[in-house]
Image (cartoon, rainbow, N blue to C red):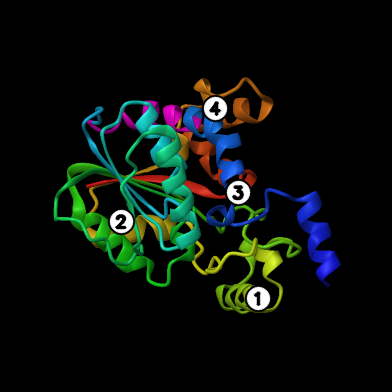
């Protein structure tokens, strides 16, 4: 079994939990992360009032690569939390090497230790599916956001049969939730290489209707999905991004985009 695990990692080197990745991986991927953050901010600025002095907080920041990209882009008030100690150690190395302050603390998504109405933008990429109490996380984000502030997050989707949370289980997002939980918790305990050696497997899976319901219950005044949020005209000129651009242009095609492309992304506005 050990040989099989090494074989999987050899041919799928990217399939490992982000917080478990190395310092060298961070350095290699910094430029791409910076480009992605630039594109994200380009899109968010059309929906939110964000400037270089805006307070930006990231949940589950791992080694702090996104915060480092923000610092290099001139953003001054950046903060983050990450529960995995080795990832925070790498963030300290990045701070020293790039002479920036990332302000990453030990913390969990369910307990955000920030003042009420104090943050302009909260970011959580591939985090919500892993938290034990996602409702508490949403409530905590709402509490710390300023009025008009935004919560941008990427997470799982039950619409697309493809996903990156567990290997060798085709159509996994379409399984009943109870079956998903049984399989992914079993894999986490017995065959952790199937879930990228992550300490917290993806237990939360979201449909668009579930996301909208959560936002309405908590009190967010607006929900924007990825097709109306991200400007794919600014991405590389590939056939995939051309398809995404068309899907975003015509709302009646959004359901097709959710079916074709794994994962999801949303902006909640308070």
Relative depth, front residue between 48 and 245: 48
Relative depth, front residue between 3 and 97: 97
**Residue name at image x 56 percent, y 36 percent:** 27
Which residue lies under the disc numbered 1? Answer: 183
Disc ID at residue 245: 4
- Cα–Cα gap, marks 1 and 3: 19 Å
- Could you tell which of marks 4 and 2 lies nearer the N-terminus? 2
Disc ID at residue 215: 2
- Cα–Cα gap, marks 1 and 4: 35 Å
Q: Position of residue 59 (x, y in %)?
A: 37, 54
- Could you tell which of marks 2 and 1 lies nearer the N-terminus? 1
In the figure, 81 relative to 78: above or below?
A: below
- Magenta residues, as a range? 36-49
- Cα–Cα gap, marks 4 and 2: 26 Å
Residues at discs 2 and 1 in contact (Cβ within 8 Å): no
Q: Does residue 88 show up magenta in the picture? A: no
The mark lying in front, picked from 3 and 4, is 3
Disc ID at residue 143: none
């Amino acid at each position: 079994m050990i040989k099989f695990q090494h074989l999987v990692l050899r041919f799928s080197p990217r399939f490992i939990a982000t917080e478990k990745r190395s310092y060298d991986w961070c350095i290699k991927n910094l430029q791409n992360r910076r480009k992605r953050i630039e594109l994200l901010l380009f899109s968010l600025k059309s929906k939110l009032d964000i400037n270089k002095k805006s307070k930006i907080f990231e949940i589950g920041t791992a080694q702090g690569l996104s915060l480092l990209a923000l610092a290099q882009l001139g953003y001054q008030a950046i903060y983050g939390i990450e529960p995995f100690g080795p990832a925070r150690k790498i963030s300290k190395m990045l701070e020293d090497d790039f002479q920036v302050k990332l302000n990453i603390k030990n913390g969990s998504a369910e307990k955000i230790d920030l003042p009420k109405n104090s943050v302009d933008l909260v970011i959580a990429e591939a985090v919500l599916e892993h938290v034990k109490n996602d409702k508490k996380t949403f409530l905590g984000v709402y509490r710390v956001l300023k009025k008009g502030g935004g919560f941008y997050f990427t997470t799982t989707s039950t619409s697309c049969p493809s996903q990156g949370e567990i290997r060798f289980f085709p159509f996994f997002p379409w399984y009943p939730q109870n079956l998903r939980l049984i399989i992914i918790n079993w894999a986490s305990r017995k065959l952790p290489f199937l879930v990228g050696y992550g300490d917290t497997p993806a237990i939360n899976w979201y449909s668009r209707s579930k996301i909208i319901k959560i936002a309405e219950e908590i009190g967010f005044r607006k929900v924007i999905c990825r097709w109306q949020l991200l400007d794919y005209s600014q991405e590389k000129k590939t056939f995939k991004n051309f398809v995404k651009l068309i899907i975003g242009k015509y709302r009646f095609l959004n359901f097709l985009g959710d079916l074709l492309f794994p994962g999801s992304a949303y902006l909640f506005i308070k």
